[in-house]
Amino acid sequence: MNVLEGERFEQRRILCDGRPEWTTVEGDELKLMDGRLIAESDAIYLPPCDPTKIICIHLNFDSRRVEFRAPELTTPTYFMKPTTALNSHRGLLHRPADCQYINYEGEIAAIIGRPMKNVGPEDAWDYIAGFAPANDVGCHDYRDTDAGGMTRVKGMDGFCPLGPGIVRGIDIRQSVLRTYLNGKVVQEDAVKDMTFPINYQLADLSRHITLLPGDIILTGTPANSRPMQLGDVVEVEVTGVGRLQNRVAEIPAPSHQIGHQPTNTDAVTRVALGGDWWAAQDKKQ
């Protein structure tokens, strides 16, 4: 069934009595499949899927392209996050103690529902299980390494929160994506303004990569990604889908100094600070 059609349906996955349980939303409560009800406020959320891979598009909103003064795009490029980056609604985002630039990037996650290979854009909607708000968190202190692949920037543990659940039966093409930092809107853009639509991305990727049930495609962030501070609460809202919430906390720096260390170069701050960096450069001229 086409993910855009039918009545809105949402499932969330939580930890209950020591085991994962699927639930539906009943007002202020969550209903387990055996009929039990628990208060939503008491729920301990789990990621709503088990991906074999997480694939992310580099740049897909014109507002972000303009912010970075990049040329117009003719084809998308992608990178991958490890599955250990998965996180959930109300999970903590950990900033290492030796880092300072951990950025939010509000996005929409398209979650694959059945095996998908060599599927054209007109049929791609039939292969999606649903959508979820997501945050493509990045630690830009490592922007000077990994040759643009962002393995460490975007791949740290917990840097892919999504949820609260998976939603189908809404026309995601009519949705608006917003990110809030401590209650203030800091990112906002309409899905219709994506340079490469969601079904285009899936068709492009599935030409040569088999997408499997549970796989996550992160579909792009608007302008105004900025660093978060310890204690900040970040929320990603997709109209018709839901609102994901996470808080920033600190963890110790690694116990040794093998490998590339965090840096604070122009290449780092240009991405971490976005338009603020460009505005500072203009003032220098």
Image (cartoon, rainbow, N blue to C red):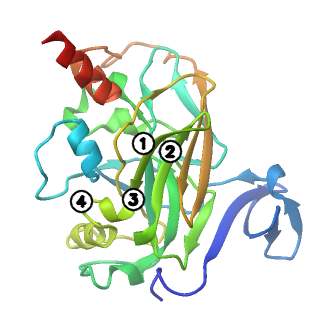
Badge 1 amino acid:
Glu
Badge 3 amino acid:
Ala
Q: Of the residues under marks 3 and 2, which one precedes in the sequence?
A: 2
Q: Of the residues under marks 1 and 2, which one precedes in the sequence?
A: 1
Is 206 drawn above or below residue 123 in the view shown?
A: above
Q: Of the residues under marks 1 and 4, which one precedes in the sequence?
A: 1
Within 10 angstroms of label 3, few (less than 14), some, or many (20 or more) residues?
Answer: some
CB under 8 Å between callouts 1 and 4? no
From the viewer's perspective, is 229 left or right of 72?
right
From the viewer's perspective, is 251 left or right of 205?
right
CB under 8 Å between callouts 2 and 4? no
Q: Which residue is mark 1?
A: 105
Tell me the SS state at disc 4.
loop
Which residue is located at x 50 percent, y 66 percent? 131
Q: Of the residues under marks 1 and 3, which one precedes in the sequence?
A: 1
Within 10 angstroms of label 2, few (less than 14), some, or many (20 or more) residues?
Answer: many
Total marks drawn? 4
Within 10 angstroms of label 4, few (less than 14), some, or many (20 or more) residues?
Answer: many
Q: Which residue is mark 4?
A: 195
Badge 2 amino acid:
Thr
Which of label 3 and label 2 is nearer to you? 3
Tell me the SS state at disc 2.
strand
Q: Which residue is mark 3?
A: 190
Can I make out residue 59 in this image? no
Q: Of the residues under marks 2 and 4, which one precedes in the sequence?
A: 2
Report, in whole angstroms, how far the alpha carbon at label 2 lies from the one at label 4: 19 Å
Tell me the SS state at disc 3.
strand
Task: Estimate the x, y position of residue 42 in percent, counting from the top left.
Answer: 83, 50
CB under 8 Å between callouts 1 and 2? yes
Q: Which residue is mark 2?
A: 179
Report, in whole angstroms, how far the alpha carbon at label 1 lies from the one at label 3: 15 Å
